[in-house]
Amino acid sequence: MGVMKKGKRKIIVDNKVFWWFVEDDSWSEPTAQIIADDHSLIANCNLYCPVLRITKDKVKGRRSVPVPENVGEMVFTPQFISQLIRLTLE
C-alpha cells in the first residue's frame, strides 16, 4: 500500500520515491516528515534541532543521525530534504 499523497511532496533520491511534508502548527516547532513510498523508511527532522530521527528503517532499524553542518542551512527545501534522505541511505 502506498502513501496517502494529499498535502505531500514527492521527491526521488537514488531512484527511490519518497514523500515529505512539513508539520507546522501553533503547538509545535516545524518538523519535516519523510516517508518512503513503500513505507520502508519513516523519518523526521525538527527545524530547530539538527537531528534526523529515523523511526522506521527496514535495513538499519530505529536510530538518530546528527545532521552535519555541511548539509546546509536548516530550511526545508527539496534540496535539503534530499540531503536528509541521503543521510539515511549511508
Image (tube, rainbow, N blue to C red):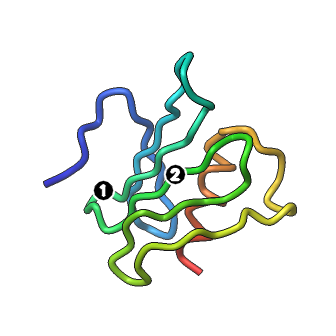
Label 1 – label 2 distance at C-alpha: 15 Å
Disc number lying in front (1 or 2): 2
Please tell me which residue lies in front, 25 or 13: 25
In the picture as drawn, the residue positioned furthest to the right comes out as 70
Q: For the residue marked with disc 1, what is the amino acid?
A: Asp
Q: Quadrant of the C terminus?
A: bottom right
- Residue to which mark 1 is pinned: 37
Assign a secondary structure to mark 2.
strand
51 to 59, vertically: above or below: above
> Would you say 3 lies left or right of 17 here?
left
x, y percent for residue 17: 38, 57
Residue at 50 percent across and 70 percent down: it is 14
In the picture as drawn, the residue positioned furthest to the top comes out as 26
x, y percent for residue 51: 67, 59
8 to 13, vertically: above or below: above
- Residue to which mark 2 is pinned: 44
Q: Along the polypeptide, which appears first: circle 1 or circle 2?
A: 1
Please tell me which residue lies in front, 17 or 27: 27
On residue 68, which mark appears? none
Image label count:
2
Graded by Cα atoms within 10 Å as few (under 14), some (14 to 19) or many (20 or more), the crowding at tag 2 reads: many
42 to 73, vertically: above or below: below
29 to 38, vertically: above or below: above
> Would you say 29 lies left or right of 22 here?
right
Q: Quadrant of the N terminus?
A: bottom left
Residue at 28 percent across and 61 percent down: it is 39
x, y percent for residue 71: 79, 59
Q: For the residue marked with disc 2, what is the amino acid?
A: Asn
Assign a secondary structure to mark 1.
loop
